Amino acid sequence: MIQIENICKSFSNGKENVIQALSDVSLTVNDGEMISVTGPSGSGKSTLLHIIAMLDTQDSGKYFYNGIDVSAMSESKKAQIRNREIGIVLQDYGLIGEMNALKNVALPLTIAGETGKAATQRAKETLCAVGLSDKLKQKANLLSGGQRQRVAIARAIVMNAKVILADEPTGAVDSKTTNDIMDLFSSINLKTGASIIIVTHDLAAAERCGRKVKIEDGTIS
Ligand SMILES: Nc1ncnc2c1ncn2[C@@H]1O[C@H](COP(=O)(O)OP(=O)(O)OP(=O)(O)O)[C@@H](O)[C@H]1O
Ligand SMILES: [Mg+2]
């Protein structure tokens, strides 16, 4: 379970320019829930996702992951959770351009020490599930935007994560592919009971989530 309580986060761009990205945000996501997060550009969606993914930390407020205060966790514990339990599709995909699609998707498995044939097979199957069976060996920086986005999705789901966070996972694909990707997230949610949080501008994608959360000016409405 993800429990965010009264979180604030600001960024400072130089001396007097402080941006309050999140102010007093509280959100609970139960195991097995699938929710959408929508809101205008700059409203704090990615910031919130990065904190939930333990890639960033709040200035104040609490984040409990399965009841444990994340601020009290060691860096190595957080890294282990990020690798094994949380899959994230970053807004800019965060792929390694020089690596092929298959190696990018296998990366979390490699980090977890799974390097055999079974791991490669799982990475392959996951890429097939996002419709990229013909691009396994293509370097990420030679893929189209929509293809890169799907590699990022495959990488986020390959570990059978308990928590899947996706930042605009359908921002670079057409409506048919959006629907396929949402089918995939829904079936993972049903089959594995993973909690899924999807940041999206796409109203059709948001409609497919069990609960819709709106964020505006760093505040959940
Ligand atoms: N690393 C950073 N340094 C400085 N300011 C930042 C940083 N990250 C985010 N911000 C600022 O915090 C605010 C919230 O940004 P965030 O990326 O969370 O918005 P968003 O809702 O994801 O927007 P979009 O829909 O455009 O992706 C913005 O005003 C942004 O400029
Ligand atoms: Mg964003």
Image (cartoon, rainbow, N blue to C red):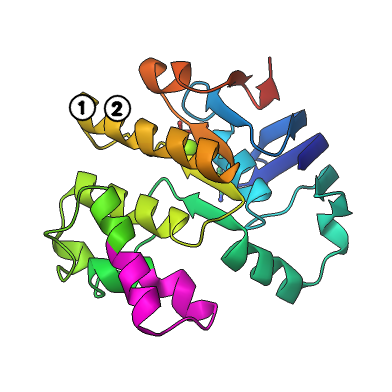
Query: Number of marks in the image?
Result: 2
Specify whether residue 28 is in view: yes
Residue 129, percent from left and from top:
29, 50
Residue at 75% across / 71% down in the picture? 77
Residue 128, percent from left and from top:
24, 55
Residue at 42% across / 84% down in the picture? 115
Residue at 41% across / 36% down in the picture? 168
Relative to residue 28, is residue 39 depicted above or below? above
> 81 left or right of 189?
right
Q: Which residue is mark 1?
A: 176
What's the magenta region? 106-124
> 55 left or right of 27?
left
Residue 37 forms part of the magenta stretch = no
Give the position of the C terminus as an image quadrant.
top right
Q: Indicate the amino acid at tag 1.
A: Lys
Mark 2 and mark 1 residues within 8 Å of each other at the beta carbon? yes
Q: Which residue is mark 2?
A: 179
Dividing the picture into quadrants, the one containing residue 69 is bottom right
Q: Secondary structure at mark 1?
A: helix
**Which is the main secondary structure of the residues drawn in magenta?**
helix
Disc 1 crowd rating (10 Å Cα; few below 14, some 14-19, many 20+) is: few
> Label 1 CB, ligand 1: below 8 Å?
no
Q: Nearer the viewer, residue 50 or 28?
A: 28
> 97 left or right of 153?
left
Disc 2 crowd rating (10 Å Cα; few below 14, some 14-19, many 20+) is: some
Q: Indicate the amino acid at tag 2.
A: Asn
Residue 104, percent from left and from top:
33, 69
